[in-house]
Amino acid sequence: MEELKLLSDKLNISLSGDQIDQFKTYYEMLIEKNKVMNLTAITEKNEVILKHFIDSISVAAAYPDFAGLCSKGSSLIDVGTGAGFPGIPLKIAFPTLKVTLLDSLNKRVSFLNEVIDELGLKDVTAIHDRAEDAARKKELRDSFDIAVSRAVAALPVLSEYTLPFVKPKGVFISYKATGAEAELSDSARAIKLLGGGSSRVYSFTLPDSDISRSFVVISKKLPTPKAYPRKAGTAKKSPL
């Protein structure tokens, strides 16, 4: 995993030997499980390292306040985590984070629990639930310092799925490729309705590549009104 060490150093993220070993084990488990269920279309080692591992942790290089948040032992929820991206790489790179991984497919959650156990990760919980339903649970609503999502959806939709989890003064970080500024502009009404405040796009290019990445960082100003999120499927069919 020398490539992982090289690229993480270029992000100014120093990974120990134990952390590199955790990423290696994670990669091996991902590829093995991918033989029997669809977790990722990306399977070549160097591509997984760049497009999943480095991409997941690159937020710390693009968004200057991220490392500071992590140093405080912040709570983070990864909404629509899938195979664990970006939540598990962030937990490995920033061990003091308290991480919740949320996904709507039980098979993926079972895989995530296997990874958590095998890697010996502490303060990590995997939850099987829809975002719309989970965000109405008292123990999860308005309770996280950071919410992240690499899920593929328009920003107004992602905001309704994700902002209800964030506590006031916390942040929602959406991983985007291109067109983030336009999406953010289209999301102004949704962000305000959901209790969001100021927002900003941080653009970044993954090291040793031409892959552009944008991080939309939305602050949480007020608790999300009880009306949101709406029932399952509504946000996608009728975005705010």
Image (spheres, grey):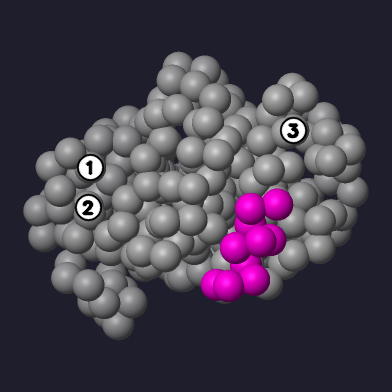
**Residue count near mark 3 (Cα–Cα under 10 Å), binned few <14, some 14–19, many ≥20:** some
Q: Which residue is mark 3?
A: 20
SS at mark 3 in the image: helix
Magenta segment's dominant SS is helix
Q: Earlier in the sequence, mark 3 or mark 1?
A: 3
Question: Which stretch did the figure color magenta?
Answer: 28-37
2 or 3: tag closer to the N-terminus: 3
Mark 2 lies on a secondary structure that is loop
Could you say which is closer to the camera, residue 150 or residue 45? Answer: 45
Observer-nearest residue: 100 or 136? 100
Q: Which residue is mark 1?
A: 140
Residue 92 in which image quadrant: top right
**Circle 2 residues within 10 Å: few <14, some 14–19, many ≥20:** many
Q: Is residue 64 visible?
A: yes
Q: Residue 208: within the magenta?
A: no
Identified by mark 3, the residue type is Ile
Q: Is residue 97 left or right of residue 4?
A: left
Against 220, is 71 above or below? above
Identity of the residue furthest to the bottom in this view = 237
Q: CA distance from mark 3 to mark 1?
A: 31 Å
Query: How many marks on residues?
Result: 3
Q: Are marks 1 and 2 in contact (CB under 8 Å)?
A: yes
Which of the image's four quarters has the N terminus? Answer: top right
Residue in the picture at 28% in, 63% down? 130
Along the polypeptide, which appears first: circle 1 or circle 2? 2
The residue furthest top is 72
At 74% from the left edge and 22% from the top edge, which residue is drawn?
Answer: 16
Which numbered disc, 3 or 1, marks the residue closer to the eye?
Answer: 3
Of residues 211 and 84, the one drawn nearer to the viewer in this rendering: 84
Q: Which residue is mark 2?
A: 135
